[in-house]
């Protein structure tokens, strides 16, 4: 799945499907997604809002209450979807840690930053309050918080947005997790701070060998961080490839649309090229390709039968695309 056949898989997801009961009917948030992640690698999951990116990862660690989940999510050989609740709680934090888009959603406003990091450590390890606090100071310094021995006693409202995200990263890495899920970790930050956070994640990965799942709508972030990329749309996988292959020769029309809609430094003042139309309803998804109504190259077959995700590279590079077009997304 990862494009690295010689790398031992840390996480293997097979045919994952997630649905929710809603007043309007069953919402099919994720439909048959599969991928792999090796140690020390970064998988980028990219797509528009509502494509199923966050639900895919949150469902694996029990954060999608009320969802119906099928498939497999094998973490170090154990199926997370079949684990009892107590065992799954033990995996969260120590095995798989999360960084959410808004750091305030992970921090309580009435407790100091250091207390919250220390309590998370003490929930998983038999250490004293003093030892946990010392570890919190060390972690804050490690992620670049200035004067951590003083800032450890600050409350969340006393940190800037970039410092809050660093504090959340410190909390996430406190137990040296094998996988770090970063869910839009830089969306609310300015470009300079975003670059700092991405460099920090790369440095932590190099130091600890942590595998990262980077969830984003920004292909610029993918270009900076990912080794492999999964493009999702309407709950399905549209394209999977190594970063270089996907950015150099995108095969699916949706991926091509995402790339065209990116701001370009060599076209300052030019107009962006948005993808026309809107994603389909996941309560009543289309019978065929979910991207068909927005695709400028759709053919009759696209409206009746969903295309499978198949290898399109033909050279062992594991570049997969779900498209009926003869060239798998190449312009006619």
Image (spheres, grey):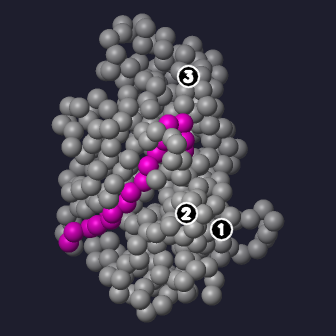
Label 2: few (<14), some (14–19) or many (≥20) C-alpha neighbours in 10 Å: many
Q: Earlier in the sequence, mark 1 or mark 2?
A: 1
Q: Nearer the viewer, mark 3 or mark 2?
A: 2
C-beta proximity under 8 Å, tags 1 and 2: yes
Q: Secondary structure at mark 2?
A: loop
**Residue at figure coordinates x 21%, y 39% from the top left:** 83
Q: Is residue 103 visible?
A: no
The image shows residue 50 at horizontal and vertical percentages of 41, 64
Question: In which quadrant of the rendered image does the C terminus lie?
Answer: bottom right
The image shows residue 201 at horizontal and vertical percentages of 59, 36
Please name the residue that numbered disc 3 is placed on.
140
**Residue at figure coordinates x 65%, y 72% from the top left:** 260
Q: How far apart are the two marked residues, 1 and 2, measured between alpha carbons?
A: 10 Å
Q: Nearer the viewer, mark 3 or mark 1?
A: 1
Label 3: few (<14), some (14–19) or many (≥20) C-alpha neighbours in 10 Å: many
Q: Residue furthest bottom?
A: 300
Q: Is residue 4 above or below residue 315?
A: above
Name the one closer to the observer, 290 or 15.
Answer: 15
Q: How far apart are the two marked residues, 3 and 1, measured between alpha carbons?
A: 41 Å
Please name the residue that numbered disc 2 is placed on.
319
Q: Is residue 176 visible?
A: yes
The image shows residue 128 at horizontal and vertical percentages of 36, 7
**Residue at figure coordinates x 46%, y 72% from the top left:** 322
Please name the residue that numbered disc 1 is placed on.
249
**Residue at figure coordinates x 64%, y 22% from the top left:** 146
Task: Kindly report the secondary structure that dominates the magenta region of the rendered protein.
Answer: strand
């Amino acid at each position: 799945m990862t494009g690295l056949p010689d790398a031992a898989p840390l996480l293997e997801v097979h045919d994952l499907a997630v649905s929710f009961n809603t007043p309007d009917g069953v919402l099919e948030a994720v439909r048959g997604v599969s991928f792999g992640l090796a140690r020390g690698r970064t998988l980028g999951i990219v797509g528009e809002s509502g494509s199923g990116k966050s639900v895919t990862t949150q469902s694996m660690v029990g954060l999608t209450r009320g969802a119906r989940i099928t498939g497999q999510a094998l973490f170090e050989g154990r199926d997370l979807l079949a684990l009892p609740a107590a065992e799954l709680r033990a995996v969260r934090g120590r095995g798989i840690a999360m960084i959410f888009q808004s750091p305030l959603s992970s921090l309580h406003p009435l407790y100091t930053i250091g207390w919250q990091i220390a309590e998370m450590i003490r929930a998983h390890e038999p250490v004293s309050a003093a030892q946990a606090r010392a570890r919190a100071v060390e972690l804050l310094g490690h992620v670049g918080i200035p004067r951590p021995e003083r800032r450890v006693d600050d409350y969340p409202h006393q940190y800037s947005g970039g410092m809050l995200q660093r504090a959340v990263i410190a909390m996430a890495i406190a137990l040296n997790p094998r996988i770090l899920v970063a869910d839009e970790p830089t969306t609310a930050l300015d470009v300079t701070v975003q670059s700092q956070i991405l460099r920090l994640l790369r440095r932590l990965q190099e130091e600890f060998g942590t595998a990262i799942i980077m969830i984003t709508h920004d292909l610029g972030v993918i270009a900076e961080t990912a080794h492999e990329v999964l493009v999702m749309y309407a709950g399905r996988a549209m394209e999977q490839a190594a970063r270089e292959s996907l950015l150099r020769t995108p095969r699916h029309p949706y991926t091509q649309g995402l790339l065209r809609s990116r701001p370009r430094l060599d076209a300052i003042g030019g107009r962006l090229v948005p993808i026309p139309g809107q994603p389909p309803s996941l309560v009543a998804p289309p019978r065929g390709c979910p991207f068909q109504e927005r695709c400028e190259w759709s053919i009759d077959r696209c409206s009746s039968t969903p295309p499978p995700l198949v290898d399109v590279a033909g050279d062992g590079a594991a570049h997969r695309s779900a498209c009926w077009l003869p060239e798998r997304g190449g312009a006619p």
